[in-house]
Image (spheres, rainbow, N blue to C red):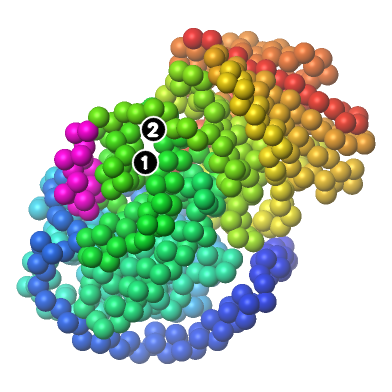
Amino acid sequence: MAHPLVNMRWYLSRLASMGPAEIVWRARSAATLPLDWARCKSRAAVPAPRWTPLRARSYPVQLYNSGAPMEHIRVFDLEFPVGFEFDWHRDYCHGRQVGRRFAGALNIRDTAVVGDIKYVWEPSRHQHLSALAFATNAEQHAGYIVRSLDSWLQANQYLYGVHWTSSLELAERVLSWALLYPRIADHVARDPDFRGRWLGSIYLHLARIARKLSLYSSANNHLIGELAGLFVGSSCFDFWPDCSAWRNLSQRLLEREIRIQVGEDGVDREQAMSYHLFTLELFLLAFAIGRNTNCPFSAGYAHRLRGMARFLDTVATRSGDLPWYGDSDDARGFLLSEDENALEVTMQLAGLLFEEPRWLRFRGTPTAASRALVPDLLANLNREAQGSFPTRELFADAGLACVRTHDDRVRLVMDFGPLGFTSIAAHGHADALSLWLAIGDEYFLVDAGTYAYHSHPEWRTFFRSTAAHNTACVDGRNQSEMAGRFLWGEKATARLLRFEDRSEQVTIEAEHDGYTRLPDPVTHRRTVDFDRGTGSVSIEDGFTCAGRHEIELFFHMHEEASVVSLRDGEATIDWRGHRIRFCSQDDRARWDILCGSEDPKRGWRSRHFNQKKPIPTLRIHVEIDGSTAIRTHLRVNS
């Protein structure tokens, strides 16, 4: 009986997150299922394409053998040899076949039917094929690319199976197809049967995306991906009269969404670093394709893109390490080389497009993306990739601050922003007032990560929880209440109270109301003093309440940190040639280190999807009675 009750609670919570207009829209969408079923059972009509052989010079993506040589295909933590013939309906991680029936009847949340859907969807994004198309050994793999495409086409009849259940997956596939097309153009010209199957599927993909956009509370990175796929697909495969309307629609909505989903300060509103990078890749790809097809985006769109890159420039260390917060599934907007990460690709493209030499510092050589999309700007890579430190430190709209020492040796990031974006806050974590601390080239105080989406629900719960972040738990509770894997019920509201820059010291003060729902309401206020000369940090956690409560403060450290000594009130850590000392004069506190604990789950970090490892986590436990302040000091010595 538990399973139906859990499902019912989820559906009620999801319904509560919708407004009347969304409920009507979803009801109308559900009413089209019989028509979709009929389309699935019959051969969908596709207009005859106005196809002509590819003219490479006029195509908006230029073909280069510039990526990394590929010997393996990576799907999260799995590796397959190049040439592997995928069963497109298999979860290779868990060794399970996926149910194959009408897409509208498949519940992708049901692991008993679809396994871990991420492992099924990922190969069918065909990003490994677009990367192969640009690899240094690409010519020898052109035949494999065609065979893989044809295999997928014949195994995925329109609206039959899981690969037609998500418009984002259709869009990501179209993006890969548009990028790899120049590599297989000769084969497309020679083989009319394959050409007919592929062009027919492209049309059906584009038409389906246009009809099934993610709107209302689902209008997050999914909608951006869908619009980018529709814009790039209709621009690169402009073979049908519908393409003009699709291109105009998607460009207009991309212009709208970049203003809605990206704040004035350039930060993605989903409160997830991974999705900031993901959407920036998509926005930049659309911008470059528009530039190359004489359908340019507006100055306002470009301004938001600059802001997104400027934020990354502020929080990224010299080596390109980032404060990873919120959800991550290792998603890429597009892929042309597996040895180029999203920061390198986005910052080089943005640096070239917007003439910002400092942003080019993360990659000294041209990326495959730059060679394919902006080859005419590559001469600018020779410009001096230096410049002064970013001047912006407060991102008030996002609820983030990033302050640094005068010599850029130590930087501190603090979060006082909303839980996430739209009413469901799908990819946010319960991390209000959390801290990240970078020393040199890497972050020492880190976020625990994500680990899993659809599988391992107990780990999904832990990695989203307050205890997995560098902030405070009260009475073992989360600041915000989870209502589903991508759904939050009661949400903590954080607000900035003070940001003072006194040249040698910065003070950040903020609070949240997540624990005011307790029978004895508690307000958590955190005041952080950061010394610009030494990088020392003083933290005061104030708890306003009337009664008794148990407080836990967590500090999650890099996995290679080594605990030298620990006693109540003091911990000494060695890491990367630095000695870091935590201390407090509060004699009520009990200090311990948690590392790889299973029950309760504590002391873990996930850098990549479906991968985790133990990390040392300092926990400071205090029992309070009435309003109390707890002070913790952190000092960094070379």
| Residue at disc 1, secondary structure | helix
335, above or below 403, in the image:
below
Going by the image, does 589 lie left or right of 84?
A: right
Residue 208 position by quadrant = bottom left
Residue 245 position by quadrant = bottom left
In the rendered image, which quarter contains the N terminus?
Answer: bottom right
Residue 274 seen in the figure: yes
Going by the image, does 118 lie left or right of 527?
A: left
Q: Is the magenta stretch mostly helix, strand or loop?
A: helix
Residue with the mark numbered 2 = 320
Residue pictured at 55% horizontal, 19% vertical: 532
Q: What residue type is labelled 2?
A: Gly
Q: How far apart are marks 1 and 2 (CA)?
A: 7 Å
Residue pictured at 54% horizontal, 56% vertical: 454
The local crowd at label 1, few if under 14, some if 14 to 19, many if 20 or more residues have their Cα within 10 Å, is many
Q: Which of 265 and 603 is in front in this view?
A: 265
Going by the image, does 282 lie left or right of 111?
A: left
Report x, y in % for residue 366.
21, 40
Q: What stretch is highlighted in magenta?
A: 366-383
Residue pictured at 50% horizontal, 16% vertical: 575
Q: Which of 95 and 396 is in front in this view?
A: 396
Report x, y in % for residue 635.
60, 14
Q: How many marks?
A: 2
Q: Tags 1 and 2 in contact by the CB under 8 Å rule?
A: yes
Residue 275 among those drawn in magenta: no
Q: What residue type is labelled 1?
A: Leu
Residue 283 seen in the figure: no
Residue 600 position by quadrant = top right
222, above or below 49, in the image:
above
Mark 1 and mark 2 lie on one chain; the one further toward the N terminus is: 2
Report x, y in % for residue 29.
53, 81
Residue 343, label in figure = 1
